[in-house]
DNA sequence: TATGAATGAGTTTTCATTCAT
DNA sequence: AATGAATGAAAACTCATTCAT
């Protein structure tokens, strides 16, 4: 059972996501959002204090999903055999791609506006970015001893991985539109496993 | 010998780069630029048709440098021994880092605003991005036969590499501020060589 | 026996008086009133056609009281001895102070908004103000012959008296908060009697 | 020699005074002001940060005049004979009327909006009002010993006088429009001298 | 009768661009 | 060439009032 209010709010949020994704935060006017949502200008302000507030709300929604995904990734790079490590990396990649695919608009909004990094979303973006790096770095450090991952400096390596993830996810999901999750996650895994095995003979 | 006009134009461009980098395109006001440049509001329009034009000019300046750098990278991934291939990748990385380091503000402006990618710079950004992918992909294809680089799909692999380049360059140059070019280019090279050698036994 | 409707209407009026007094007509929102009254936004419009209407209603309520007070003041300045005249002025002052004290919020609303005198209450304010002047002037004229009040022009004198009344009532009731009705009405009477006896030797 | 800027600013201020006087602060739109001043909407904001700022500026201009007038009134109620005291009060009244007459619009703006006493001019109004009371009270106290002024409480008496001043000035300058400064100041003086001589036999 | 969600006209303010000097 | 005052279109936000339930 869904109330009238919830329906209206959903319409506004949904329209806002579409517009922010299409035109960016700065260029999206509140009048664009309400026009798309099919409600009056004033109605917007019954649900959100400002354009900024709804934007942040949308970002934070995705940030929550993303954060809990990262926190669950406790066995990234872990394993007692090369195969097991590879399997864990593969799972991580596959789930990460899925997360992006399902929430592609919100993801795009967050990472685009975060990159242009001025205004009020900068802290939100910085937080998630730092968290991403921290988790990947920690997992690398934890599993250095297994010998299946090799590196001089975990933070540097984590940065490589994140760049690789993010760019290619956007390129394939966004630019290319169609995406073979299985193939992409496998190739990603192979590249990463290769990159991390570098000094192994 | 530099004319007064050239000097004034230089002042405006230089101020614009600083402001765009500091506040982003949308939030930078023409009045910010002229204030920093120490000229009058009207003077700006003697040299540039619009705020957009100067922005594009700055981006294109960097795009030219970047393009010619890419075009010169004819021997990326080439070589008749593993060591030679590695050396070429290392040179490429080192020069790329140098290019970013020297032009960090313009690079940041282009890639940040490009990511948020709406408005008139989108084509500029797309062009350079596509060119980057094309060149890396072509070099990979050209050297597949040597056996020192292994991959299923060159475009996928190129995307991995570019993500890795870009993110880590910004992270280390920008966020970390200080950067050891030698160490970073070496680690980058090792990771890439590893990633590209994946199926090699 | 009071109906539910009457109770609701009373709640709204009472809340409106509080809010108009606290924030003024312009700054008081209908939503402030209904919030304070504990009814829904729409309910307001079942009882009043507009924000203006309730405002006018409140003012007119006080105006009625005030008018009938003035009309009753038939023996102001009258008397066959100085002592009797003084006594009548004293009574008038005391009752006037009482009227203001009891209805301080409505009085404040009327006189404040009347002073800033634009919009729909201007006529209401002007009417009461004119009536006040007329009555005082007429009483002065009627009793000029007694010799206990001396003046060149009754209207001028009436204006003096009204300014004296109004300002000091607000100053002592409003600003000073606590008020000694006996002392204030006595001092007022003495000052007025003095002012009106000026040419008497 | 008057600059273009000064001329424009003067036009805006002058139009603002007219509009504030005609419609009050709340009802005056910036678009009213610029229309009357014959400049563009944006021009207003080259000279004033907000509608509030210009309003306060106008009020403070008058407050300065008024304050310095009060500070100069050192001999109010002073004198070694009844005639001399009377002469000083008369001068004060005449000059006060003149001050109001010359600056009638600004005076009206200040006292009207101050009376409705919400918003940002309240402190300005309160300050001048308090100063007025303080000065009159002090002058009364200083000259109590001469015996030409009689009262129980100087503050009460000061309040009477100020109410009398203000109301009648507005009534005659504003409502009646035409005003005989000599006659009004003389009658005011007589009334005040009478009121203050009350206990004298 | 009562509710409260929805409406949309109205107002302030910003800032890229123009143009008279 | 240079100036900087002037322009006016555009956009966010408020709130009295309406209306479906």
Image (cartoon, coloured by chain):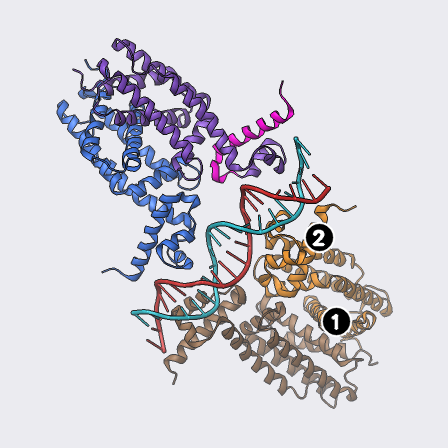
Chain colours: A orange, B brown, C purple, D blue, E cyan, F red
- Label 1 resides on the chain identified as A
Q: Nearer the viewer, mark 1 or mark 2?
A: 2
In terms of secondary structure, where does tag 2 sit?
helix
Q: Within the magenta stretch, is there residue C31?
A: no
Is residue A168 visible to the viewer in this orientation of the structure? yes
- Of the image marks 1 and 2, the number of the one nearer the N terminus: 2
**Quadrant of the rendered image containing residue B113:** bottom right
Q: Within the magenta stretch, is there residue C6?
A: yes
Residue at 56 percent across and 82 percent down: it is B64
Q: Quadrant of the N terminus of chain D?
A: bottom left
Packing grade of label 2 (10 A; few <14, some 14-19, many >=20) is few
The magenta-colored residue range is: C1-28
Residue under label 2, please give it: A10
Residue at 25 percent across and 59 percent down: it is D2
Q: Quadrant of the C terminus of chain D?
A: top left
In-front residue for pair B163/D36: D36
Image coordinates of residue A111 in percent, x first then y, are: 66, 64
Q: Is residue C154 above or below residue B27?
A: above
Q: Is residue C104 left or right of residue A53?
A: left
Residue at 66 percent across and 81 percent down: it is B90
Q: Is residue B64 left or right of residue B199?
A: left
Packing grade of label 1 (10 A; few <14, some 14-19, many >=20) is few
- Label 2 resides on the chain identified as A
Is residue D71 visible to the viewer in this orientation of the structure? no
**Quadrant of the rendered image containing residue C129:** top left
Question: Can you tell which mark lies on residue B116?
Answer: none
Question: Can you tell which mark lies on residue A177?
Answer: 1
Confirm whether circles 1 and 2 share one chain. yes
Residue at 21 percent across and 27 percent down: it is D187
């Amino acid at each position: 059972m869904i109330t009238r209010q919830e329906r209206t709010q959903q319409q506004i949020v949904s329209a806002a996501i579409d517009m922010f994704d299409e035109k960016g935060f700065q260029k999206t006017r509140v009048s664009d959002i309400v026009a798309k949502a099919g409600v009056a200008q004033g109605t917007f302000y019954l649900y959100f204090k400002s354009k900024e507030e709804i934007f942040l709300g949308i970002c934070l929604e995705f940030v929550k999903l993303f954060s809990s995904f990262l926190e669950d990734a406790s066995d990234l790079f872990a394993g007692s055999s090369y195969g097991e490590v590879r399997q864990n990396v593969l799972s991580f990649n596959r789930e990460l791609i899925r997360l992006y695919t399902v929430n592609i608009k919100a993801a795009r909004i967050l990472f685009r506006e975060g990159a242009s990094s001025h205004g009020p979303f900068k802290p939100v973006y910085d937080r998630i970015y730092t968290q991403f790096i921290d988790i990947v770095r920690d997992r690398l450090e934890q599993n250095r001893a297994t010998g299946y991952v090799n590196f001089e400096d975990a933070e540097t390596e984590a940065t490589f991985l994140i760049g690789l993830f993010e760019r290619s996810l956007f390129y394939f999901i966004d630019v290319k539109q169609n995406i073979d999750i299985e193939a992409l996650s496998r190739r990603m895994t192979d590249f990463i496993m290769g990159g991390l095995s570098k000094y192994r003979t």
